[in-house]
Amino acid sequence: MKRRTLALLTASTLTAISRIASAQDGSGTGSNNLLHGSSNGDLGAALQEYLALPGTKSYLIHAGPGGGLGQLAYHPDRFLFTASAYKTFVLGQYLRDVEAGLLSEDELLAIDDNVRMLGAPVFLELAGMTSARSVLDAMLAYSDNIATDIATAKVGADRVRALIAQLGLSSIRIPDSTRRFFSYLFGAPAGVDLGWQGVLNAVQNSTGIVQPQLNDVITLAGSARDFVSWYEQALQGTVFSKPETLRAFKRFQSESIQILLTIPPDTPAYAKGGELPALPGSTLNAKSFAGQMMVNNGEGTVPVTFGFVVNWDGPASGFDAVEAEFFAAIKGVLTAIKQALQ
Protein backbone atom coordinates (compact mmCIF):
# COMPACT_ATOMS: atom_id res chain seq x y z
CA MET A 1 0.00 0.00 0.00
CA LYS A 2 1.26 3.45 -0.84
CA ARG A 3 2.61 5.20 2.23
CA ARG A 4 0.90 8.46 3.07
CA THR A 5 2.17 10.92 5.62
CA LEU A 6 0.35 13.73 7.28
CA ALA A 7 2.56 16.22 5.49
CA LEU A 8 0.49 15.85 2.33
CA LEU A 9 -2.03 18.61 2.90
CA THR A 10 -3.70 20.54 0.13
CA ALA A 11 -3.11 24.25 0.39
CA SER A 12 -6.81 24.99 0.69
CA THR A 13 -7.26 22.61 3.62
CA LEU A 14 -4.19 23.94 5.40
CA THR A 15 -5.54 27.46 5.11
CA ALA A 16 -8.96 26.40 6.31
CA ILE A 17 -7.63 24.54 9.35
CA SER A 18 -5.35 27.45 10.25
CA ARG A 19 -8.31 29.81 10.06
CA ILE A 20 -10.51 27.52 12.17
CA ALA A 21 -7.95 27.13 14.93
CA SER A 22 -6.65 30.69 15.06
CA ALA A 23 -9.94 32.49 14.79
CA GLN A 24 -10.67 32.04 18.47
CA ASP A 25 -7.69 33.86 19.95
CA GLY A 26 -4.78 33.73 17.57
CA SER A 27 -2.73 30.84 18.88
CA GLY A 28 -2.61 28.91 15.62
CA THR A 29 -2.36 25.15 15.29
CA GLY A 30 1.33 24.34 15.51
CA SER A 31 2.39 22.28 12.49
CA ASN A 32 -0.76 22.20 10.38
CA ASN A 33 0.42 19.42 8.09
CA LEU A 34 -2.19 16.92 9.08
CA LEU A 35 -4.42 15.62 6.30
CA HIS A 36 -4.47 14.25 2.82
CA GLY A 37 -7.15 13.73 0.20
CA SER A 38 -10.87 13.43 0.69
CA SER A 39 -10.81 13.46 4.49
CA ASN A 40 -9.72 17.12 4.63
CA GLY A 41 -13.26 18.41 4.81
CA ASP A 42 -14.10 15.91 7.53
CA LEU A 43 -11.25 17.16 9.68
CA GLY A 44 -12.18 20.78 9.16
CA ALA A 45 -15.78 20.08 10.13
CA ALA A 46 -14.75 18.10 13.21
CA LEU A 47 -12.37 20.85 14.35
CA GLN A 48 -15.13 23.39 13.90
CA GLU A 49 -17.43 21.23 16.01
CA TYR A 50 -14.83 21.00 18.75
CA LEU A 51 -14.05 24.72 18.75
CA ALA A 52 -17.78 25.50 18.76
CA LEU A 53 -18.11 23.87 22.18
CA PRO A 54 -18.83 26.38 24.94
CA GLY A 55 -16.11 27.71 27.20
CA THR A 56 -12.34 27.39 27.12
CA LYS A 57 -10.85 24.72 24.86
CA SER A 58 -7.48 23.11 24.36
CA TYR A 59 -6.10 20.25 22.31
CA LEU A 60 -2.87 18.72 21.06
CA ILE A 61 -2.58 15.89 18.53
CA HIS A 62 0.69 14.22 17.53
CA ALA A 63 0.79 11.88 14.54
CA GLY A 64 3.86 9.69 14.69
CA PRO A 65 6.33 9.74 17.60
CA GLY A 66 6.61 13.28 18.92
CA GLY A 67 4.35 14.53 16.15
CA GLY A 68 6.93 13.62 13.53
CA LEU A 69 4.29 13.08 10.84
CA GLY A 70 2.34 16.17 11.80
CA GLN A 71 0.53 17.82 14.65
CA LEU A 72 -2.42 20.00 15.45
CA ALA A 73 -2.54 22.20 18.51
CA TYR A 74 -4.90 24.73 20.00
CA HIS A 75 -3.63 26.34 23.21
CA PRO A 76 -2.04 23.05 24.32
CA ASP A 77 -0.46 24.68 27.40
CA ARG A 78 -3.68 25.98 28.89
CA PHE A 79 -4.03 24.97 32.54
CA LEU A 80 -7.53 23.53 32.83
CA PHE A 81 -9.55 21.31 35.14
CA THR A 82 -9.15 17.77 33.81
CA ALA A 83 -11.03 15.76 36.46
CA SER A 84 -10.45 11.99 36.45
CA ALA A 85 -7.92 11.96 33.60
CA TYR A 86 -5.23 12.03 36.31
CA LYS A 87 -5.98 8.43 37.30
CA THR A 88 -3.60 7.23 34.57
CA PHE A 89 -0.70 8.52 36.69
CA VAL A 90 -1.87 6.51 39.70
CA LEU A 91 -1.98 3.41 37.48
CA GLY A 92 1.53 4.14 36.22
CA GLN A 93 3.03 4.35 39.71
CA TYR A 94 1.09 1.31 40.90
CA LEU A 95 2.44 -0.82 38.06
CA ARG A 96 5.97 0.49 38.69
CA ASP A 97 5.62 -0.74 42.27
CA VAL A 98 4.38 -4.12 41.05
CA GLU A 99 7.35 -4.24 38.71
CA ALA A 100 9.70 -3.49 41.62
CA GLY A 101 8.13 -6.22 43.76
CA LEU A 102 6.68 -3.75 46.26
CA LEU A 103 3.07 -4.53 45.38
CA SER A 104 1.10 -7.31 43.71
CA GLU A 105 -1.96 -7.22 41.48
CA ASP A 106 -3.19 -10.26 43.43
CA GLU A 107 -3.14 -8.51 46.80
CA LEU A 108 -6.54 -8.27 48.48
CA LEU A 109 -7.63 -4.74 49.34
CA ALA A 110 -10.46 -3.60 51.59
CA ILE A 111 -13.60 -1.80 50.44
CA ASP A 112 -15.37 -0.16 53.38
CA ASP A 113 -16.48 3.22 54.72
CA ASN A 114 -12.85 4.20 55.29
CA VAL A 115 -12.50 4.61 51.51
CA ARG A 116 -16.12 4.98 50.37
CA MET A 117 -16.74 7.92 48.05
CA LEU A 118 -19.28 9.27 45.59
CA GLY A 119 -18.64 8.73 41.89
CA ALA A 120 -18.01 5.01 42.32
CA PRO A 121 -20.17 3.06 39.86
CA VAL A 122 -18.43 -0.24 40.63
CA PHE A 123 -17.77 -0.27 44.39
CA LEU A 124 -20.20 2.25 45.96
CA GLU A 125 -22.53 -0.27 47.60
CA LEU A 126 -19.98 -3.04 48.15
CA ALA A 127 -18.04 -4.05 51.26
CA GLY A 128 -15.36 -6.67 51.67
CA MET A 129 -12.11 -7.55 49.94
CA THR A 130 -11.12 -7.55 46.29
CA SER A 131 -7.90 -7.91 44.34
CA ALA A 132 -5.71 -4.97 43.42
CA ARG A 133 -6.22 -6.00 39.80
CA SER A 134 -9.97 -5.47 40.17
CA VAL A 135 -9.34 -2.11 41.84
CA LEU A 136 -7.20 -0.96 38.90
CA ASP A 137 -9.78 -2.29 36.45
CA ALA A 138 -12.53 -0.26 38.15
CA MET A 139 -10.35 2.87 38.27
CA LEU A 140 -9.51 2.81 34.56
CA ALA A 141 -12.61 1.27 32.99
CA TYR A 142 -15.27 3.11 35.00
CA SER A 143 -13.29 5.86 36.75
CA ASP A 144 -14.46 4.55 40.12
CA ASN A 145 -13.43 7.01 42.87
CA ILE A 146 -13.31 4.37 45.61
CA ALA A 147 -10.91 2.33 43.49
CA THR A 148 -8.85 5.45 42.83
CA ASP A 149 -8.53 6.36 46.49
CA ILE A 150 -7.57 2.78 47.40
CA ALA A 151 -4.89 2.67 44.70
CA THR A 152 -3.58 6.15 45.53
CA ALA A 153 -3.29 5.28 49.21
CA LYS A 154 -1.33 2.12 48.38
CA VAL A 155 1.32 3.91 46.31
CA GLY A 156 1.22 7.30 48.03
CA ALA A 157 0.10 10.47 46.29
CA ASP A 158 3.52 12.09 46.78
CA ARG A 159 5.19 9.22 44.93
CA VAL A 160 2.76 9.69 42.04
CA ARG A 161 3.68 13.39 42.04
CA ALA A 162 7.37 12.45 42.04
CA LEU A 163 6.82 10.35 38.90
CA ILE A 164 4.98 13.24 37.28
CA ALA A 165 7.85 15.60 38.12
CA GLN A 166 10.47 13.11 36.93
CA LEU A 167 8.83 13.06 33.49
CA GLY A 168 8.70 16.86 33.26
CA LEU A 169 4.91 17.17 33.42
CA SER A 170 4.98 20.46 35.28
CA SER A 171 1.32 21.42 34.82
CA ILE A 172 -0.21 18.27 36.30
CA ARG A 173 -1.96 18.54 39.67
CA ILE A 174 -3.43 15.57 41.54
CA PRO A 175 -5.17 15.24 44.93
CA ASP A 176 -4.21 13.01 47.84
CA SER A 177 -7.64 11.42 47.34
CA THR A 178 -10.88 12.28 45.62
CA ARG A 179 -12.54 12.40 49.06
CA ARG A 180 -10.07 14.96 50.39
CA PHE A 181 -10.58 17.00 47.22
CA PHE A 182 -14.35 17.07 47.75
CA SER A 183 -13.86 17.72 51.46
CA TYR A 184 -11.84 20.81 50.59
CA LEU A 185 -14.41 22.02 48.07
CA PHE A 186 -17.11 21.83 50.74
CA GLY A 187 -15.12 23.82 53.29
CA ALA A 188 -12.76 21.48 55.13
CA PRO A 189 -9.19 22.69 55.66
CA ALA A 190 -6.67 21.53 53.08
CA GLY A 191 -5.66 17.93 53.71
CA VAL A 192 -8.61 17.14 56.00
CA ASP A 193 -10.81 14.18 55.10
CA LEU A 194 -14.44 14.67 56.18
CA GLY A 195 -14.98 10.92 55.98
CA TRP A 196 -17.75 9.11 54.16
CA GLN A 197 -20.60 10.39 56.31
CA GLY A 198 -19.09 13.86 56.36
CA VAL A 199 -18.99 14.04 52.56
CA LEU A 200 -22.59 12.79 52.37
CA ASN A 201 -23.69 15.42 54.88
CA ALA A 202 -21.85 18.15 53.01
CA VAL A 203 -23.40 17.19 49.69
CA GLN A 204 -26.91 16.78 51.09
CA ASN A 205 -27.06 19.68 53.53
CA SER A 206 -24.75 22.44 52.30
CA THR A 207 -25.72 25.31 50.03
CA GLY A 208 -22.85 24.44 47.73
CA ILE A 209 -19.10 24.30 47.45
CA VAL A 210 -17.05 27.09 49.01
CA GLN A 211 -13.82 26.54 47.08
CA PRO A 212 -13.51 26.55 43.27
CA GLN A 213 -12.69 23.24 41.59
CA LEU A 214 -9.70 24.83 39.83
CA ASN A 215 -7.56 26.29 42.61
CA ASP A 216 -3.98 26.55 43.85
CA VAL A 217 -4.36 24.17 46.81
CA ILE A 218 -6.05 20.87 45.86
CA THR A 219 -7.22 20.27 42.32
CA LEU A 220 -7.27 17.85 39.38
CA ALA A 221 -5.76 19.76 36.50
CA GLY A 222 -3.14 20.05 33.80
CA SER A 223 -2.47 20.81 30.15
CA ALA A 224 -3.16 18.89 26.96
CA ARG A 225 0.58 19.02 26.20
CA ASP A 226 1.54 17.25 29.40
CA PHE A 227 -1.07 14.54 28.91
CA VAL A 228 0.25 13.92 25.40
CA SER A 229 3.81 13.81 26.75
CA TRP A 230 2.76 11.30 29.42
CA TYR A 231 1.14 8.90 26.98
CA GLU A 232 4.03 9.16 24.53
CA GLN A 233 6.57 8.41 27.26
CA ALA A 234 4.55 5.70 28.98
CA LEU A 235 3.54 3.85 25.82
CA GLN A 236 7.03 3.85 24.32
CA GLY A 237 8.34 2.21 27.49
CA THR A 238 10.07 5.12 29.24
CA VAL A 239 8.05 4.71 32.43
CA PHE A 240 8.47 0.95 32.86
CA SER A 241 11.49 -1.35 32.89
CA LYS A 242 9.85 -4.61 31.83
CA PRO A 243 7.83 -5.38 28.68
CA GLU A 244 5.20 -7.21 30.73
CA THR A 245 4.58 -4.05 32.77
CA LEU A 246 3.96 -2.04 29.61
CA ARG A 247 1.57 -4.77 28.43
CA ALA A 248 -0.31 -4.49 31.72
CA PHE A 249 -0.47 -0.70 31.39
CA LYS A 250 -1.89 -1.05 27.88
CA ARG A 251 -4.44 -3.59 29.03
CA PHE A 252 -5.79 -1.37 31.79
CA GLN A 253 -5.72 1.73 29.58
CA SER A 254 -7.64 -0.03 26.81
CA GLU A 255 -10.63 -0.61 29.10
CA SER A 256 -12.01 2.93 29.36
CA ILE A 257 -15.67 2.98 28.36
CA GLN A 258 -15.09 6.34 26.68
CA ILE A 259 -12.89 4.71 24.04
CA LEU A 260 -16.02 3.34 22.36
CA LEU A 261 -17.41 6.88 22.11
CA THR A 262 -14.33 8.54 20.66
CA ILE A 263 -12.02 6.13 18.81
CA PRO A 264 -12.75 4.90 15.24
CA PRO A 265 -13.89 1.26 15.09
CA ASP A 266 -11.27 -1.50 14.96
CA THR A 267 -8.53 0.84 16.19
CA PRO A 268 -6.44 -0.14 19.22
CA ALA A 269 -6.37 2.68 21.75
CA TYR A 270 -5.18 3.42 25.27
CA ALA A 271 -6.87 6.37 26.94
CA LYS A 272 -8.57 7.89 29.97
CA GLY A 273 -11.13 10.66 30.22
CA GLY A 274 -12.43 12.88 32.96
CA GLU A 275 -15.58 14.84 33.62
CA LEU A 276 -17.23 16.95 36.26
CA PRO A 277 -20.68 18.50 35.91
CA ALA A 278 -21.18 21.75 37.78
CA LEU A 279 -21.46 21.21 41.53
CA PRO A 280 -23.95 23.07 43.74
CA GLY A 281 -22.64 26.58 44.22
CA SER A 282 -20.54 26.49 41.04
CA THR A 283 -21.04 26.79 37.30
CA LEU A 284 -17.78 25.12 36.18
CA ASN A 285 -18.19 22.02 34.01
CA ALA A 286 -15.23 20.05 32.65
CA LYS A 287 -14.46 17.34 30.10
CA SER A 288 -11.13 15.82 29.15
CA PHE A 289 -9.93 12.90 27.09
CA ALA A 290 -6.33 11.90 26.41
CA GLY A 291 -4.45 8.89 25.14
CA GLN A 292 -3.11 7.22 22.04
CA MET A 293 -4.58 5.24 19.15
CA MET A 294 -2.60 3.00 16.81
CA VAL A 295 -3.31 3.28 13.07
CA ASN A 296 -2.26 0.54 10.66
CA ASN A 297 -1.09 2.16 7.42
CA GLY A 298 -0.21 -1.04 5.58
CA GLU A 299 3.47 -0.86 6.48
CA GLY A 300 3.11 -0.90 10.23
CA THR A 301 1.37 1.06 12.93
CA VAL A 302 1.48 4.80 13.49
CA PRO A 303 0.79 6.20 16.98
CA VAL A 304 -1.59 9.14 17.17
CA THR A 305 -1.38 10.71 20.61
CA PHE A 306 -3.96 13.27 21.71
CA GLY A 307 -5.22 15.41 24.54
CA PHE A 308 -8.53 17.30 24.54
CA VAL A 309 -9.78 19.50 27.39
CA VAL A 310 -12.74 21.87 27.68
CA ASN A 311 -14.00 23.87 30.68
CA TRP A 312 -17.24 25.83 30.49
CA ASP A 313 -19.70 27.68 32.69
CA GLY A 314 -23.29 26.54 32.83
CA PRO A 315 -25.80 24.52 34.83
CA ALA A 316 -25.21 20.84 35.47
CA SER A 317 -28.42 20.15 33.57
CA GLY A 318 -26.67 21.07 30.32
CA PHE A 319 -23.66 18.82 30.89
CA ASP A 320 -24.88 15.74 29.03
CA ALA A 321 -25.57 17.65 25.81
CA VAL A 322 -22.10 19.23 25.75
CA GLU A 323 -20.47 15.92 26.62
CA ALA A 324 -22.16 14.25 23.64
CA GLU A 325 -20.90 17.03 21.35
CA PHE A 326 -17.41 16.69 22.86
CA PHE A 327 -17.28 12.97 22.11
CA ALA A 328 -18.71 13.40 18.60
CA ALA A 329 -16.19 16.10 17.66
CA ILE A 330 -13.23 14.07 18.92
CA LYS A 331 -14.40 10.97 17.08
CA GLY A 332 -14.69 13.03 13.91
CA VAL A 333 -11.16 14.40 14.28
CA LEU A 334 -9.58 11.02 15.03
CA THR A 335 -11.51 9.28 12.26
CA ALA A 336 -10.30 11.84 9.72
CA ILE A 337 -6.71 11.40 10.89
CA LYS A 338 -6.97 7.63 10.69
CA GLN A 339 -8.27 7.90 7.11
CA ALA A 340 -5.41 10.22 6.20
CA LEU A 341 -2.81 7.77 7.47
CA GLN A 342 -4.17 4.71 5.70
Image (cartoon, grey):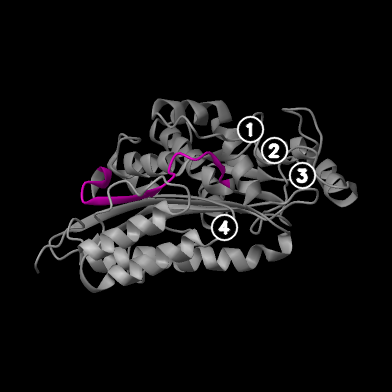
Does residue 303 show up?
yes
Q: Amino acid at mark 4?
A: Tyr
- Of badges 4 and 3, the one in the foreground is 4
Q: CA distance from mark 2 to mark 4?
A: 19 Å
- Of badges 3 and 2, the one in the foreground is 2
Q: Which mark is residue 113?
A: 3
First in sequence: mark 4 vs mark 3: 3
- Of badges 3 and 1, the one in the foreground is 1
Q: Which residue is mark 1?
A: 176
Mark 1, other Cα within 10 Å: few <14 / some 14–19 / many ≥20: some
Q: CA distance from mark 4 to mark 1?
A: 20 Å
Q: CA distance from mark 4 to mark 3?
A: 20 Å
Membership of 70 in magenta stretch? yes
Q: CA distance from mark 3 to mark 2?
A: 17 Å
Q: Secondary structure at mark 3?
A: loop
Magenta segment:
66-82
Q: Secondary structure at mark 2?
A: helix
Q: Which mark is residue 328?
A: none
Q: Are marks 3 and 1 in contact (CB under 8 Å)?
A: no
Q: Amino acid at mark 1?
A: Asp
Q: Which residue is mark 2?
A: 181
Q: Are marks 1 and 2 in contact (CB under 8 Å)?
A: yes
Q: Position of residue 41 (x, y in %)?
A: 32, 71
Membership of 156 in magenta stretch? no
In this view, 66 is above or below 268 = above
Q: Secondary structure at mark 1?
A: loop
In this view, 341 is above or below 133 = below
Q: CA distance from mark 1 to mark 2?
A: 8 Å
